């Protein structure tokens, strides 16, 4: 599974709070970024949850 944060990110950091192992906040760009090319299996469910809960629909997932 792959994930990316689009330019629609509002910078509210909800994904960072939910899964800081995968999402990091970029202070220069004022948006979240994904730390992995391929999401480790142990984080897949929480990344899906972050995408579902993203108010800006800014997290895209590729299965």
Image (spheres, grey):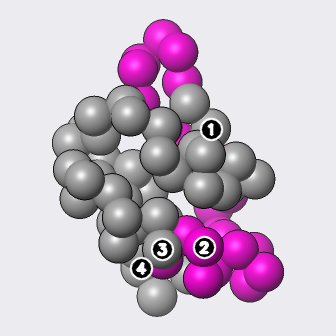
Marker disc for residue 46 = 2
Spatial distance from mark 2 to mark 1, Cα to Cα?
14 Å
**Tags 2 and 3 touching, CB below 8 Å:** yes
Spatial distance from mark 4 to mark 3, Cα to Cα?
14 Å
Residue located beneath label 3 in the image:
49
**Tags 1 and 3 touching, CB below 8 Å:** no
Magenta residues, as a range? 26-48
Whether 36 is drawn above or below 31: the answer is below
Spot occupied by residue 31 in the image (x, y as percentages of width and height): 41, 30
- Residue 60 left/right relative to 48: left
Whether 20 is drawn above or below 3: the answer is above
Q: For the point 48% across and 74% down, which residue is it?
A: 49
Spatial distance from mark 2 to mark 4, Cα to Cα?
14 Å
Visible in this render: residue 23? no
Spatial distance from mark 2 to mark 3, Cα to Cα?
5 Å
**Tags 2 and 1 touching, CB below 8 Å:** no
Spatial distance from mark 4 to mark 1, Cα to Cα?
19 Å
Query: Disc 1 vs disc 3: which is toward the camera?
Result: 3
Visible in this render: residue 52? yes
Query: Disc 2 vs disc 4: which is toward the camera?
Result: 2
Residue located beneath label 1 in the image:
24
Residue located beneath label 4 in the image:
62
Reading the chain from its start, which is encountered first: label 4 or label 1?
Answer: 1
Element under disc 1:
strand
Q: For the point 48% across and 11% down, which residue is it?
A: 28
Element under disc 3:
helix
**Tags 4 and 1 touching, CB below 8 Å:** no
Whether residue 7 appears in magenta in the rendering, the answer is no
Neighbor class of circle 2 (other Cα within 10 Å; few <14, some 14-19, many 20+) is some
Reading the chain from its start, which is encountered first: label 4 or label 3?
Answer: 3
- Between 62 and 24, which is closer to the camera in this rendering? 24
């Amino acid at each position: 599974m792959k994930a990316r944060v689009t330019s629609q990110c509002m910078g509210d950091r909800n994904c960072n709070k939910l899964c800081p192992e995968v999402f990091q906040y970029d202070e220069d760009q004022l948006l979240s970024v994904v730390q992995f090319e391929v999401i480790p299996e142990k984080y897949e469910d929480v990344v899906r949850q972050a995408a579902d809960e993203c108010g800006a629909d800014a997290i895209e997932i590729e299965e």
